[in-house]
Image (tube, rainbow, N blue to C red):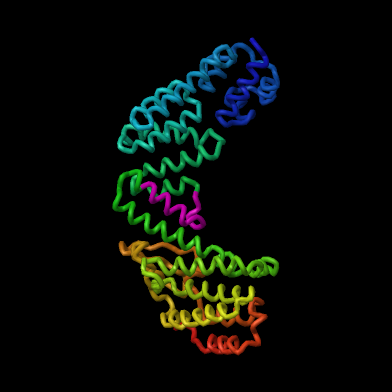
Amino acid sequence: MSELKISEIIKRERKRVGISQEKLAEELTVSGQAVSNWERGGYPDIELLPRIAHFFGITVDELIGSDEASREADINSFRERCDELYREPSSRVALAREYYKKYPRDYEIMWMLGSYIIDDMDNIVENRAILREISDKIIEGCTYEPYRSGARDWLYLISADDEEEKNMAATGRDWGEDTAKIEEMKEERLWRQRRYNEYRAQREKTDLLYFTHYIGREDSRMAFETDGERLAQRFADPEHTVKWETYKIKLLEVIDGAEHTVPDGWLGAYGDAHLKAAGALCAVGKVDEGFAMLEKSLDICEAWRRFPKKSRLPLGEVFGSPTVEIHGMPNIYYPDGSTSWMPETMLFWWLPGDIVNALETWHWFDGVRGDERFASALARAKSIKEPD
């Protein structure tokens, strides 16, 4: 028996199943020092070999290295056969179940089996029990986080409607922090369960959340910022701001496919993008373009202020025709009666005072403060009333 060989195999198998030396010692009812000695080149008492092999789901011959090559060849053959069966999901599940029975502690095989079951949802009833079994094994015993996260997601994807919230919580996701990703998980669940009409409605909700995050995350980050160094970064790159804000303007103008027709719910974000572009254009010396943008921002603001606080305004047919509650804690309301919270609050909370503050404090406007157009714009901004 080769001391070096068995030490390598114990160390390799321990890492494969994702446990510490201390945990392995506890499982085998030996000391932590014993396991450490084995992995440094020693080997266990001969009567311990069957117990160790059983724990790892291998034979004694494999443990001592005499059958290692054949085991690795067997698993490689399994991987190749699975690749060949990618168009036959049920056959691939059946093969993976065989190998899981053969190697019941191999987390890679568990992972492959679980993934194949999720891809074969037509036969989920007969495979649900084993999927729960391997999910529990991975969650409880494996330390490789991608496997653990995937196993938690599997339990959610197969959950019935009355189990959905409980199993979403079990995924470890924070409902308050990762709103768009959670909506995508709901979408994936409906897709996997072949509930296509519900899936399409959910997809529209997910698209809206990702879109608002895409165009609004920087505003949310800076909304209540007080640190001077970080505030300065907002104005550090006016060239990029011009590009980004004009791009946002174009995106908002084509939400419903009709160019320059922006749904009312987006007017606040639309006007704010014009304001930021105006300041940045002035900062880079494109003064005429900057004042044109500023006038447009004031026009939009006058239209936006007509809506009372907490009005519900449309966000576009492409997102399933939802409405948003503005000038408050914005909530999204969907035609099916459901609601969701909108994390990017500042997109729907734009007031005339924001323009006055920008004109009076943004250093981007320092070079044009003596221009008559600037004085006119500031006076106009101060004359626009806040919404009721």
Decide if residue 103 is on the left or right side of residue 18: left
**Residue 308, magenta (yes or no):** no
**Residue 183, magenta (yes or no):** yes
Q: Nearer the viewer, residue 78 or 1?
A: 78
Decide if residue 369 is on the left or right side of residue 78: right
Residue lying furthest top: 1
What main secondary structure does the magenta stretch of the protein show? helix
Q: Quadrant of residue 260?
A: bottom left
Location of the N terminus by quadrant is: top right
Q: Is residue 162 above or below residue 130?
A: below
Q: Position of residue 174 (x, y in %)?
A: 50, 53
Q: Nearer the viewer, residue 315 or 260?
A: 260
Q: Is residue 193 above or below residue 235?
A: above
Looking at the rendering, the stretch of residues picked out in magenta corresponds to 173-189
Q: Position of residue 129 (x, y in %)?
A: 37, 33
Task: Count the marks.
Answer: 0
For the point 59% across and 12% down, which residue is it?
A: 47
Q: Position of residue 328 (x, y in %)?
A: 47, 73
Location of the C terminus by quadrant is: bottom left
Q: Nearer the viewer, residue 306 or 330?
A: 306
Q: Position of residue 247 (x, y in %)?
A: 50, 66
For the point 37% across and 37% down, which residue is it?
A: 119
For the point 53% across and 78% down, which residue is it?
A: 293
Decide if residue 162 is on the left or right side of residue 222: left
Q: Is residue 187 above or below residue 277?
A: above
